[in-house]
Image (spheres, coloured by chain):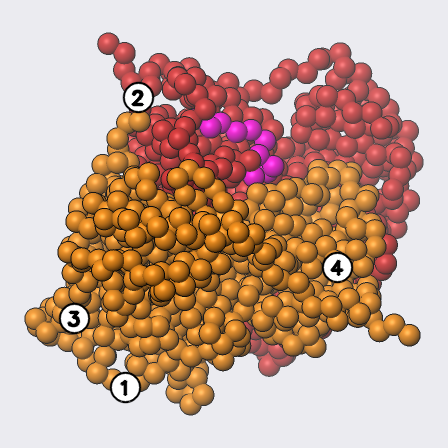
Chain colours: A red, B orange
Amino acid sequence: MTRTVPVAQYLFRRLHELNCKSIHGVPGDFFLRALDHVRPAGLNWIGNANELCAGYAADGYARAGHHVAARRSGTGPKVGALFTTYGVGELSAINAVAGSYAESISVVHLIGTPSRKAWRTASAARPLHHTLGDGRMGVYAEMAKQITCAQTKFHEHDRVAEAVQAYDETLRECVLRSKPVYVSVPVDMMEVRVSAELLERPLQISAPSNKHDTEDQLVQSIAERIRKARQPLLVVDGLSYPYDFLTEVNALANMIPTACFGSAMGAVDGSARYWMGTLSGPTEYSSSTDLVLLAGPMLSDTNTAAWTAIPPTESRILFNLDSVEMEGQVHPVQGKVVLQKLVRELSSNAPKPILMSEKKTTTAQYTSASNAADRITQDVFWSTMSSYLKPNDTILLANGTPLIGGRDMTFPSPTQVVASSIWCSIGQMLPAAQGISLAKRDSGLPGRTILFEGDGSFQVTCQALSDIIRYRLDVTIFIVNNGGYTYERWLNGMEAEYNDVPSWRYAKAASFFRAEDHQDDYPVLEKTVRTMGDLQDLLAQDGIHAGKGLKLVDVVMDAEDVPGRAKAGLRKASEALRAQP
Amino acid sequence: MTRTVPVAQYLFRRLHELNCKSIHGVPGDFFLRALDHVRPAGLNWIGNANELCAGYAADGYARAGHHVAARRSGTGPKVGALFTTYGVGELSAINAVAGSYAESISVVHLIGTPSRKAWRTASAARPLHHTLGDGRMGVYAEMAKQITCAQTKFHEHDRVAEAVQAYDETLRECVLRSKPVYVSVPVDMMEVRVSAELLERPLQISAPSNKHDTEDQLVQSIAERIRKARQPLLVVDGLSYPYDFLTEVNALANMIPTACFGSAMGAVDGSARYWMGTLSGPTEYSSSTDLVLLAGPMLSDTNTAAWTAIPPTESRILFNLDSVEMEGQVHPVQGKVVLQKLVRELSSNAPKPILMSEKKTTTAQYTSASNAADRITQDVFWSTMSSYLKPNDTILLANGTPLIGGRDMTFPSPTQVVASSIWCSIGQMLPAAQGISLAKRDSGLPGRTILFEGDGSFQVTCQALSDIIRYRLDVTIFIVNNGGYTYERWLNGMEAEYNDVPSWRYAKAASFFRAEDHQDDYPVLEKTVRTMGDLQDLLAQDGIHAGKGLKLVDVVMDAEDVPGRAKAGLRKASEALRAQP
């Protein structure tokens, strides 16, 4: 007799195989009892307060797998997963899924839909709830197609065995293309049984093998270009995290002058021989480079100081996930493999010693110059907080002043910094922190999860704090409480009322969301700091440095304050917005 | 010299013409200083905590225009409006906009996008933030096309005068088709000036005139069918609100036996001669009717007790917005005009007196039978709360037990009940209440805004409470605090942990969101009630009956409790979900 498993069980067991041990979401009636299969498959169900939070959390969960500790141990998740209901649920999460697409994060979006019969007989005369009322039942999948790299719709398959194989293929695409995928399962198929033998064949997740000759030739010519370059520059960019380039770029940083864009902060060990720091704009060296190697490039305006940070030179070599671009030619090879071979090639035949005219970025220590009664300024805050960080931390920078201020921090090694390269959606990072902390716990990864949040951002997805508390996750949050969208103030209206946000009692949040105070197994620390003295007192406490439990620090700052370094750039961006085409 | 106005000003002045006096949204960098033009155009900017709340609030704002008081005075808004930023903003609101589409609500969604130059030069090599990074800049508009009835994209127009005329046409569609529309404006066009003369021609918002002969013939044959019917039944459905059928269906309810589906509660005066109440399932009369007139039909499963409430007869006449369907034929005429003529025809030549075998629905008064120490049950709660309602109230029923329990209430006349007919998205109603209360204030409409909320729903969009407080809106909220998704429990797993939601300190919410207590101009009342005694004490207070300020009542009930009447239906729905196709 053939052993069988229900479809729902199959879905979850495959996720488990990808080291995804938790599924985020909000249940819906089209789930049937699918969630009863979560635990038997070795997973946890994480019931988020809403679907947008679930989507961001699933994205964060996948990002935790990019931490160097996860790569080394091989235990980190390869995907994040969320499960929402048809229509109302999936659309509420769609902004998060689109963000995963934009930033190349592997997320599996499962959707529980109406029955196969409903799909066959759909009509405007007898519309189902959660539809648009006009019989167009496939609309949401059409929308999702724009922002996912592969889709499996179970109701389109006559045979369930065929459907689960299409699912396997979709998971493969998710991992190999590093993009979200869409998987919809009708309610009446959740419990349909499929042969368990299918599960005995492991998922085939391996990149197509490169043509060695092409690769070797390419590596040779790249190495030659580097050796001949007067002033080469490796720029590590944000997609080096999902593309798993960290080992290679760290090796190269000991051979070639190396910098990063904001979204790749933390990716390179600051003690590397040729490390130059984060490019917040053009530097003397970057302006006059004659060869730029770009690893995991995401060359958006926000990430590249509006494309000014490196010259618009012809001499660029781009290392992508599944291609390398050089002299206008796109070579269909695995970027990681080429980088690996390049490291080997350069190690055995090193480029001539390179004169570094540039100094490494060092962080000014303003803290000691402050008086205890001084208000906390952005300039002082970010450099002060550098000393708070420890190896293995994952540091999230919310869109807004944290994304700017984070560039003034120094990161111990290894750390992972999560800073949006292109999506830049406020509200993303609190639920992402929930997902990351969970993945760290699920996979036994070391280090704290630390979020630098904005007040405007916090208000977008505040219920994620309830999710953090509900699942007793270890997260430390510093809220930059400056009464508004300060980034927007600098761009479009410094004193405009529409850039204000109301002043919540942030330091009462955990109590509102009912974290039980003083529980030994889940310590909660809430605190408002207004002066440098307050901040120093806080940092002098042992408790604030421990990763365990929830820490929520409400850091009061001035509404118009931004790091001094960033002011010129913000003024320029504001002018650029005003320029006629 | 020709007077000119900036495009942004033009957008807002047209909204003002449609009695829309507030715009909801979250600002973005692609707005430039557009929001500076809101007040000069006579509007208010409502800065919501997030875009989903803004979308639901704009939907609610438009619904306030369906209140009979708004129809009578002609002052109610004809549309709601929201303004979000490109990509991240618009996608966060898309579930709400899709809901407006499904439930036929007129909402104008404005989007600030990158500049015309960016649209022309878009590429994967130089991607802008908020894009997907691959140069496909039109993706979000493609998605929106699925869930809006008309679109204007300003960047597609060479001449700005042409663009604003397309905008006018799109607004016209929004009102006439009673569906949301999509209007995107690039950042560099916000301040481009356009002739003010264009604004001097008012918007032409009138339905195409019907062919009188066709209409009259149709009305005659409908009247004849009614007169010949043994047992005719008028079923008023939810779309009677947006289609403005209220006057007509109330007149008919004095001539023909009349009932309603859940989404049309409040639409018909309970004292009408032939009023039979809300159909929660088939009744003796409805089962044996030989002619059903359906006004504003939205025949979804959830709204019609899975299509059992009325027989699947051939003898149906459907009155839609711009068509009437009879005997399988669709007549392209204005439903409202046909109904008006039908009322006139039947008034002068009345149908034969109809024998009503059915009694009007009366609400049992359990309250007096309760002991003060009794826990509050669903059966007792809804009937008790009937006595709390007053004429002109707008009552919102959140998806979940309030949508079920509301059917046990009696509504004084006139009231408006907002109960989802098809979209059924949890989290919709709190922000909708914000929008409704605001529209009532903007338009000077009478009556309170009362929300019966679920705890699961509240957690989805809790930040809407901050918006309510920020703008000092008058809203009364009763939260059914039963620890989870009770509706889901009955369908898919009564004791399943995934149907639990965490227990927040709801009665501390206003304080967390910083409503200042005891301010005379914005009184705040927060209270938890656990027993019938608590509830009776609360209802004995004068303060709870006043509409002014914020009232938030946390009503603790049992996790598995639902109104007794609904249990059989829920069991059936649960079985239906399990049935193989």
Residues under labels 4 and 3: Cα distance?
Answer: 58 Å
Rendered image quadrant of residue A342? top right
Q: Is residue B425 magenta?
A: no
**In this view, the mark in front (4 or 3):** 4
Left or right: A287, with A473 as reference point:
right
Q: What kind of residue is marked 2?
A: Arg
Q: Is residue A148 magenta?
A: yes
Is residue B60 in view from this perspective?
no
Marks 4/1 same chain:
yes
Residue B164, numbered label: 4
In the image, residue A196 sits, relative to residue B392, either above or below, namely above
Give the residues in magenta.
Answer: A143-154
The residue to which callout 1 is attached is: B542
Task: Please indicate whether residue B423 sits to the left or right of residue B115 in the image.
Answer: left
Residue for badge 2 = A193
Q: Are marks 2 and 4 in contact (CB under 8 Å)?
A: no
Q: Which residue is pictured at 29% across the width and 65% down the height?
A: B254
Mark toward the start of the polypeptide (4 vs 1): 4
Question: In the depicted view, which residue is nearer to us: A546 or B293?
Answer: B293
Residues beneath discs 3 and 2 located on the same chain:
no
Which badge, 3 or 1, is on the more N-terminal residue? 3
